[in-house]
Amino acid sequence: MDRQDDVSHYSADREAVRQLIDNLTGLRQLHRHNLLGNLQERQQDIMEPVIEGELKIPSPGDWLDYLVDAGERSLLFWDTLQKRADNTLAHEQAGSPPLLKFDYEVLLDGADLEIPVNYSLLRILPDRDQPIDANLPVNDSLAPVIVIDPRGGHGAGIGGFKQDSEIGESLRAGHPTYFIAFDYSPEPGQTMIDVAMAQMRFIERVTARHPKAGKPVVIGNCQAGWALMGLAAARPELPGLVIVNGAPLAYWAGENGSNPMRYAGGLMGGAWATRLASDLGNGRFDGAWLVSNFEDLNPSHTLWSKGYQLYANIDSEAPRFLDFERWWGSPNLFNAEEIEAIVDDLFIGNRLAGATSGSGNLLDLRAVEAPVVVFCSYGDNITPPQQALDWIADLYPDDLALQSAGRTIVYLKHASTGHLGIFVSGRVARREHRQMINAIDEIKALPPGLYELIIDKSPDGDAAEYQVHFESRGIADIRALDSDEHDEDWEFIEVDRVSEVTSNLYGWMVRPWLSRAINEPMAEALRKTHPFRLKRSLWGSQNPFLWWLPGAAEQARETRHPVSPQNPLLAWQDLASRNIVNTLDTWRDIRDASNETMFHAIYGYLSLLSGTTRSPTEIRRDESEERERIERLKDALPEGGELEASLRVLLLFAKAEGKLSKSVLETVVQGYRKAATHLPDLATIREITRQQNLLVFAYPEESLQQLPNLVPDEETRQRILDTIPRIEPAWCNGEGDTGKLWRQLQELFEQPSQDSASKGSVSKGKVSKAT
């Protein structure tokens, strides 16, 4: 028997080794395919001006004009860099306040709480020039909107440092708007739990200020998004709607060949480097490291394109560049306890939504009761759609589990915008954020389930107007985002284990003496000389070698000689820029492919040694429990009255069409508000909707056939039939599934109910007997 066991173990080990080799071979083929494809595209990009005939031989006059313009551009470019450095210094000297375009008042300062934190609750004050839809003032009857600023390394104010922003769109829609901001430096001993408790106080304060408006809509960006989900799980009664933008809720998820950021913790050997950086900061972690990591993801943009865009458009680009850099160039600080909890529990441990190697999850996100909206983008290299959405499939194994829990989750995917574009792009604010905020009531009215929010162009062709509808989705759609057959979770388990070992070794061997050797002046000196800050501050007015720059730049500005757009040397300049960008992008692709291969080779081998073979986030479905749940539902099919029947009919039509338009939901919401005094409270209606939605999902045909038993009288049936065309006329006129359902419904309601039929038979029997 022992020999047979040895043979079985040997065979299993051989199979695991073979699988690892196959995975690495497939990964190498994927990288080669991607690299060759990208090289081909870049070659076409370089050859484009040649093919188009844009490259011409310049004349001596062209050279003279170009060199004069280049000299003036260089002076103005350097002057802009100096203004950036001076703006950063002035911002720091002012105490690093939130860089908001809007006026505000501080309602509650976190420093005054029992457990002080460096967060504050601000009330946004719209000015007279604030664009407002339909010229309506801020409406206190609308749900207040709270935007939580992400503390991800950069400065405060990302949600509202320009008009086209989340704050601007909230004010435009007439919502009372609030902002939760943070200061540059955390309070001594501050932890993430302290911050969460303070934010709960802030939300309670806003709710108390608007007692008739309902629970607030809370928006969290990036780091604030996953923190908001944890808050909503701990205190589910606080938010009325949760919107998370670009927030990594399942950090292990991603696609091979596309998302290298998730491997950083493993390649560095765990979280010990975070502890080292905190100790070098005298117990405070410098957010410049996080910002630098983000910039390293796209070296061509960081090292060249960003500066070249400013240089090539120096006469118009400087104000936008300075506005962005005023926010981007002011990193904040974290306490060691804060950043270590973030790295250990989220980036490496994945303990927010996914199961782990044994440490357990921080919170159960299934406790979140409010509808959740998730906004992500395929162009986001920090939080790809898999990291933003995979938590849904981790928590709910199937559609019935999600709907049984009564949870409503809506997601919105952008095709191309980057991570920062989700928060700072004016185009995204005017399209995606405006439509999400305008659809707040409709999202709350959605029945439980998973939906994708689709934004369509207006049929009248107006590019500034959009229409919104919600298409039903399933857990299978979330799983389909992970196109890789190779399950990587067991490799990330090894990262978590290695990180625990290396962090403990650092804590035993280095931290005791290093933390005592570093004092605050030394830590501040290290922060000032961080490469991210140094490359900015060296251009400042304090640099004595640049005393001549302001005067020279002003003279160049007054005697500007811009080169003609037809000058052939501009095409050659653009070609040189393309070559630099393509070279840096190719180097990035090779670097990322090498890092990804190294990660899977190291941690794939470690997983073989430890015997880890199954993903910890794989939830085994209990089919017997599922069948029992469905059987229990069947008993509720004939139960209910007019309200249950009306909701069931609406849900049947929504299922038949496969989507719900915003206009349909608006009609339903308005109808509820008009008849609210004659209807049960909102919580009861939501529970009835959840039950009817489950019935329609599990028993669509039986739900339809049982409708006559819910409304036996003809007057009520006719009232329901009359309501359908008012909600959506197309349902009654179509030839598709909705048209078929409409005809079936008319036929059913023209028949007597089973109860009425049986009573009629009994009555006839009595009459005959009496006769």
Image (cartoon, rainbow, N blue to C red):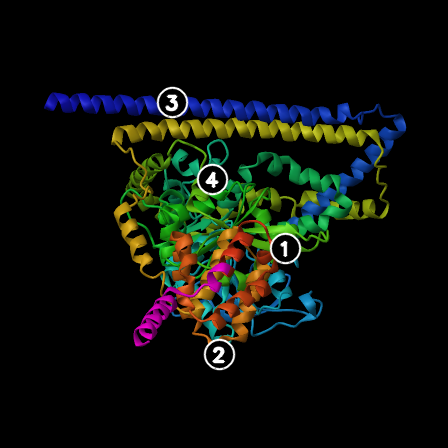
User: Image point 43% across, 24% down: which residue?
Assistant: 26
Q: Which residue is mark 2?
A: 677
Per the model, the C-alpha gap separating discs 2 and 4 is 45 Å
Q: Which residue is mark 3?
A: 22
Q: Which residue is mark 4?
A: 481
What's the magenta region?
Answer: 747-771
The single residue placed furthest to the left in the displayed view is 1
Q: Amino acid at mark 3?
A: Asp
The single residue placed furthest to the front in the displayed view is 771
Per the model, the C-alpha gap separating discs 4 and 1 is 26 Å
Can I make out residue 766 in this image? Answer: yes
Indicate the position of residue 359 as horizontal and vertical percent values: 28, 47
User: Image point 83% across, 24% down: which residue?
Assistant: 56
Q: Main secondary structure of the magenta part?
A: helix
Mark 4 or mark 1, whichever is nearer to me: 1
Mark 1 or mark 2, whichever is nearer to me: 2
Determine whether 643 is above or below 661 in the image. Answer: below
Q: What kind of element bears circle 1? A: strand
Q: What kind of element bears circle 2? A: helix
Q: Amino acid at mark 1?
A: Gln
Per the model, the C-alpha gap separating discs 1 and 3 is 47 Å
Mark 4 or mark 3, whichever is nearer to me: 4
Q: Amino acid at mark 4?
A: Leu
Give the camera-side residue of 534 and 359.
359
Indicate the position of residue 501 as horizontal and vertical percent values: 29, 39
Per the model, the C-alpha gap separating discs 1 and 2 is 31 Å
Indicate the position of residue 485 as horizontal and vertical percent values: 40, 31
